[in-house]
Amino acid sequence: MSLSLIFDIATSLLLARWKQTLVAAIGVTFGVTAFIALLGFMSGLNELLDGLILNRIPHVRLYQEIKPSTHQPVQLYNLYRENYNFIRSLKSGYNRNDIYNSQALLRAVKQDSSILGAAPRVTAQSFFSAGAINITGVVNGIDVESEVNLFHFGDYVIGTDPIELKNTKNGIVLGKILADQLLVEIGDIVYLTTADGRRFPLKVVGFFQSGLADIDKVQSYASLATVQKLMGKSGSYVTDIALKLKNIDQAPVIATQYSKLFSIDAEDIQTANAQFETGSSIRSIISYSVGITLLIVAGFGIYNILNMMIYEQMDTIAILKAIGFSGKDIERIFLIIALAIGVAGGIAGLCVGFLLSFAIDQVPFTTRALPTITTYPVNYSLVFYIIGFAFSMITTYLAGWFPSKKASRTDPVSIIRGK
């Protein structure tokens, strides 16, 4: 039979049982809506949790680790070289705290096509004066623009634009808990004493809030030049270089290459945060599993509805076969019905899912970990919508295929004789 006639018959059967058709379409709509809203919300939360750790951690960290001496002076003396030396008081040998020839190293890594960017850092132990008490802290000297662009430094700074740290001479951003302990506000002066006894006044230009108390009570940030001056070092003094890669999966390989190439210590993000990466993967698997389960449940509902529709339409099927419709034609009719339900329910599910995701995105949500976040995070990735619609078509096709096979094998004579 002609395809147009088959479409007309399928449309008539759909409209004849429009309540059943509507219930089936609503089932698909609910499944796709739940899939999109759940995946968008869970993925948004995963990105938020990942960002709390990964945003501030370099993909590869280059640094110079202090190592103990591998040989004692007595071992260098030829007279005792063959003797057994029981001296075991190994002390740290002469090592540089800073990275040797850091400026040349920075230029080299920035020319690497796999490197998105590099940020030099200097770390200095310090004490903050709170009346007669000194509070232990750490001052991190950073290249402000690099940190903002590569490691989302601005997302954790409150009370000011982070670029003010670069523009303000002798400025400092204090950890929020540390600032509360010192009873200071933006614009106040704090006095900092370095480990070697140098004392400097610094102007508070903002607060750093990571949401982790152990960090916010000790960490503070100043420009690279300010910390170098506090330590009495030159402008080439750098203790760490933080690298951001274009492909994070290459971090272990690049860390190994740079460690050998520059004779420097290198740590990749996978090694430093293996347990965190595992947790993120498990959360994603759970989200997809729940969403796909909802679509499968909706598919079973459609299967039951189509099964009942075929049972109620046995007379119609017998008449169609009696006037010349083949089993393939009957199969196509009910597959068209199933796919029509899938298309209508899938499109409606995409729209309602987007609206529900948008509604979730407007719900107020505040966290001390990310002060710039004001509502629940939602991921509007197009991939979720494509998967949701494709899966709605697959489930409805399978849900219609089995009943349509049953209808195509129906014997019209036995039906008419029974009537």
Image (spheres, grey):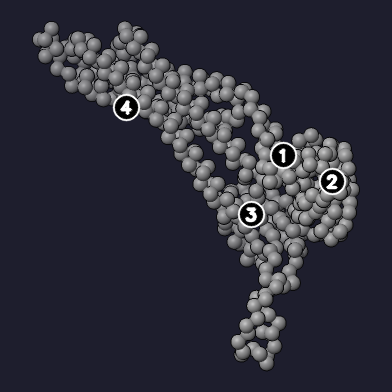
Q: What secondary structure is found at the residue carrying circle 3? A: strand
Position above or below: 58 against 38? below
Name the quadrant of the N terminus: top left
- The residue under label 3 is 60
Q: Which mark is residue 209?
A: 1
- Inspect the image, locate mark 2, and give the three-letter code of the amino acid beneath it: Ala
Of mark 1 and mark 2, the one earlier in the sequence is 2
Residue 396 is situated, as x and y percent measured from the top left of the image, at 35, 24
Q: Earlier in the sequence, mark 3 or mark 1?
A: 3
Amino acid under label 1?
Gln
User: Which residue is tagged 4?
Assistant: 398
User: How far apart are labels 4 and 2 at the CA level?
Assistant: 72 Å
In the orientation shown, which residue stands out farthest toward the bottom?
79
**Residue name at image x 67 percent, y 71 percent:** 68
10 Å crowding of disc 2: few (<14), some (14-19), many (20+): some
Mark 1 and mark 3 in contact (Cβ < 8 Å)? no
